[in-house]
Amino acid sequence: MPVDYTVPAIDRAVRLLEILSLAPHGRSLAQLADELSVPKSTLFRILHTLEEHAVVVEDPDRKVFTLGMRLLEWGNAALSRIDLKTVAHPYLQKLAHETRESFYLAILDHDDVILIDHVDTPEVWKMVTRLGHRSPIHCTASGLVLIADRDAHEVERLIGRKGLKKFTETTITTLTALKRRLVNIRKEGYSIVDGEYKPDLCAIAVPIRDHTARVVASLMTAIPSERYRKSKRKAKELISFLTRSADQISIRLGYNPSKPPSAHPET
């Protein structure tokens, strides 16, 4: 039988903080004791200790406890040490191992998409641009994912600076068509770009979010267009792999899936 090294008082304190994190208006001592099934006298000592360290605060008028600012300090300190590439790279490696495909991490840098990390397989690596190279927003899977949550005015500003250059016969070249595309991407949660930037390349991308629910990066894979057109089932499988990993990376960055991003006006 495994040994339980849990410290009961610390376990109660953590569960207490979890309850308060979901109670913006606070909880009274009686309510907390009831939810935790802990005697009031025991819980009072825990609350007093946490209050001494500004982890919780008591409203003397309403007699309720809420989370204190010390947690914000700790959270910001932890977030400042999180490096996107460090967090994401093991997931790229795992994806490449599981699927034998190549995977890429991209961000928006000013008005361009830039690849900042990758794990390649020999079959695909020559088809995708090198790390650090800039690509357009409007006709790349990563670019579309990275701006799908932006409001209409911001999208217009981004596109206004670089325009909608035509790269292939299927490249989107009107703002109206781009906005329709972004609405669908926002609803579906992924982007597929087939032959719109490079004629023989199909790219699939999903968003990665940070602790504010903002899209900060995209997770992308690319396959030859011929393979995509022959088997749409393969694309669905890759979307599933990408979404699962992007969700895990987002959680590592502090994203809370139970608090979805706020809705933006229709782009």
Image (cartoon, helix red, strand yellow):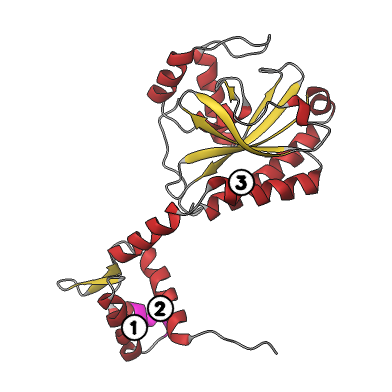
State left or right for residue 107 relative to residue 222. Answer: left
Real-space Cα distance between discs 2 and 3? 31 Å
Q: Looking at the picture, how far across and down is residue 165, in whole percent?
A: 56, 10
Q: Is residue 225 magenta?
A: no
Going from the N terminus, do you reach mark 1 or mark 3 first? Answer: 1
What secondary structure is found at the residue carrying circle 3?
A: helix
Against 147, residue 19 (above or below) is: below
Amino acid at pointer 3: Ala
Real-space Cα distance between discs 1 and 3? 37 Å
Q: Are marks 2 and 3 in contact (CB under 8 Å)?
A: no
Q: Relative to the observer, which residue lies in front, 118 or 216?
A: 118
> Which of the numbered marks, if any, corresponds to residue 246?
3
Amino acid at pointer 2: Ala
What stretch of residues is rendered in magenta? 32-37
Residue placed at 40% from the left, 78% from the top?
A: 13
What secondary structure is found at the residue carrying circle 2?
A: helix
For disc 3, the neighbor class at 10 Å (few under 14, some 14 to 19, many from 20) is: many
Against 116, residue 19 (above or below) is: below
State left or right for residue 114 relative to residue 129. Answer: left
Q: Which residue is mark 2?
A: 13
Against 204, residue 9 (above or below) is: below
Q: Looking at the picture, how far across and down is residue 261, in whole percent?
A: 45, 44
Q: Which residue is mark 1?
A: 46
